Image (spheres, helix red, strand yellow):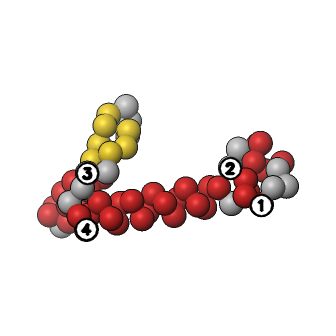
């Protein structure tokens, strides 16, 4: 968390980090189930996380 959210007493602000992580996990799960790309920027490149997971499984 950044300094602003740590100093806040608002419970909604304090819970935002967990909520965003939960939403990201759900988006990735849904993308994998439906074959929908889930794009993020990693190391300055646009990456489809649904394809990244498939490539790792094939390599094993």
Which mark is on residue 48? none
As displayed, is residue 30 above or below residue 4? below
Q: x, y percentage for residue 12?
A: 72, 58
Disc 4: CA contacts within 10 A as few (<14), some (14-19) or many (>=20)? few
Marks 4/3: CA–CA distance: 10 Å
First reached walking from the N terminus: tag 2 or tag 1: 2
- Disc 3 is placed on an element classified as loop
Residue matched to label 1: 11
In depth, the one of 40 and 36 nearer the eye is 36
Residue matched to label 4: 33
Residue matched to label 2: 1
Q: Is residue 52 visible?
A: no
First reached walking from the N terminus: tag 2 or tag 4: 2
Marks 2/1: CA–CA distance: 14 Å
- Disc 1 is placed on an element classified as helix
Marks 2/4: CA–CA distance: 30 Å
Q: x, y percentage for residue 60?
A: 18, 67
As displayed, is residue 15 above or below residue 41? below
In-image side of 27 versus 21 (left or right)? left
């Amino acid at each position: 968390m950044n300094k602003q959210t740590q100093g806040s007493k608002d419970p909604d602000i304090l819970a935002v980090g967990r909520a965003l992580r939960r939403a990201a996990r759900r988006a990735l799960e849904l993308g994998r189930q439906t074959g929908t790309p889930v794009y993020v920027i990693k190391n300055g490149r646009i990456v489809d996380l649904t394809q990244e997971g498939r490539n790792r499984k094939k390599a094993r």
